[in-house]
Amino acid sequence: MELTKNITLGVYLPGNTLIHTLDPRTKIVATALLITLLLFIKSYLAYVLFLILIIAILIIATIPPGYAFCGLKPMLPILLLMWIFQLFLYSTPGATVIFSWWIFSATDAGLHMGNLISMRVLFLFTVTTILTLTTSIVSLTDGLESLLNPLKKIGLPTQELVMTMIIALRFVLILAEELDKIIKAQMARGVAFDRGNFIQKTRNLFPVFLPLFINAFKRAEELIVAMEARSYSGGKGRTKMKTLHMGRLDLLAGLFMLLFSVLVVYLILTIPPAI
Amino acid sequence: MNPLIEVANLSYSYRAGSGNEVAALKDITMKVFEGELLAITGRNGSGKSTLARHFNCLLTPVSGSVEVDGLSVSDKCNVASIRRQVGMVFQNPDNQLVSSIVEEDIAFGPENLGLPAEEIRRRVDWALKTLNLKNLQYESLNQLSEGQKQLVAIAGVLAMKPRCIVLDEPTAHLDPRSRREVIKNALRLNREEGITIVLLTHFMEEVTHCDRMIVMDMGEIKMEGSPREVFDSEEKIINLGLDFPVSAKLAEGLRKQGIRIPRKTINAEELIKSLCQLK
């Protein structure tokens, strides 16, 4: 059982392309904008526009398409299921039946709905993947901290929240490795994780997660002492080594995104929805 | 030499799980001098960690006093400036590193001090260079060996430019080669950068490089002096649950065989020297 291999959280492809060098804030806001637009799109033409944009970004950022889409693989069965559900269960009055079998019947409205929703999920996934592929976790958190800054005024401890995130990211792998070790230790002592019925299997997990949690708390305690020893006393008075800079490229990218959004909004407003 | 840390009649006790008061430190009086390399040894539970944690305000005395450069540890107003002067490195590197990237983690301390960005950059670069970590600057911490992580932890403390670094069993989790690497760098910081080092350790080989050593047991200081003086009293060392450096044992064995090796030979270099002088 190699758990660490399956963790692809925030895979980052280092690079020096235009997309990589953009300010993380630009990329986060752009991603948020694209996600919002995706939620309102109801026409194929807009999706084609999106596809062009995404392919263009992938080319500029020199991301191999395989990389951008390989994370989708485990989602495909769910997507297919969703599509089938929409196809057979969604219908509008006056929709034409295109296919029927036994008690099931598919309408063209259902077909469109299935297509649109599947595409929406696909594009949502790809857009966020592009963000994590081209932005390191460190600059992501930096960007997030800076973007959340205004919320400090209403009393949200943004710096502490981001620090929590940074530490969580660091310990994901450590805890995964530890889980691996505990499982192996228990296996060495005769716990058969793959045998028995559901209840027995569930019961076998207790001697795994109990030590993991206890160790996690011990680690947390030690970490607190170490952070305190390194003069950490909350976000107050803390400075950053890397300050973020918006450049001309960010302005250009922002303008481009604005144009794109205007175009998409225009499409949303003028083209009658496919269903 | 003037004392940097002065401990006077320090006692500390904590409440154990059973509810009883356990005295971890009993009436300790000692000094850490500016620029020295001091080793504190003793078996597990001897109180050496508890003592060291008073040096940078992680613990405050129950009775007695601890002063760092004249500032009392018990006074809350002094905490920030004392932690600026006395840095601390712990046993398990994984539980003291905060960020996922080497240079980001080294910047954590200076960032806490509220320094301007350029100054932090300068200090991080300096710490990386001093500990020869330049090639690991952008590396992910998960990719590093335990020994390299411990060096990053030391760099993180070094970047805060402390006058004293307390190393709390920094090599306990390491393999022999990384252990040597860590100790070598600690020695270098002491000799070349003039940083006072307090080394808490179980390994007698590491102690032989120090200027002075303190042996603790049951919350008390049992022996104090140069490693040469301390290792001279054989029985006491064994009774305190400690061991001799390999070179000292070897020298002793050779002496018993009638080979003339001077007493008080404690480290490999000295042993080699006296062996070479035999003929």
Image (cartoon, coloured by chain):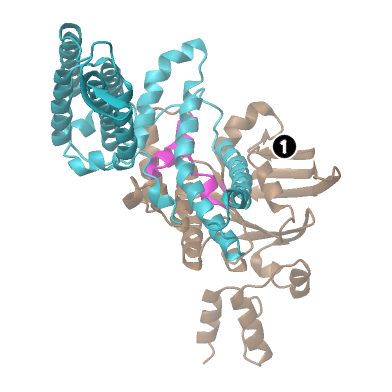
| Residue at 52% across, 50% down | B93
Q: Is residue B278 above or below residue A147?
A: below
Q: Secondary structure at mark 1?
A: loop
Q: Is residue A53 above or below residue B123?
A: above
Quadrant location of residue A245?
top left
Give the left or right position of residue B260, taking residue A267 as reference: right
| Residue at 14% across, 22% down | A49
Q: Residue B88, how many percent across, how many down?
A: 57, 45
**Residue tagged by mark 1?**
B60
Q: Colour of chain A?
A: cyan
Let me know if residue B96 is in the magenta part: yes
Say which chain tag 1 marks.
Answer: B
Query: Among the chains, which one is brown?
Result: B
Query: Magenta span covers which residues?
Result: B89-113
Q: Residue A231, how many percent across, how many down?
A: 55, 34
Give the left or right position of residue B29, taking residue A40 as reference: right
- Residue B190 can be seen, yes or no: no
Q: Residue B149, how many percent across, how many down?
A: 46, 52
Report the amino acid beneath label 1. Thr
Crowding near the residue tagged with mark 1, few <14, some 14–19, many ≥20 C-alpha atoms within 10 Å: many
Q: Is residue A70 above or below residue B241?
A: above
Q: Is residue A133 above or below residue B151?
A: above
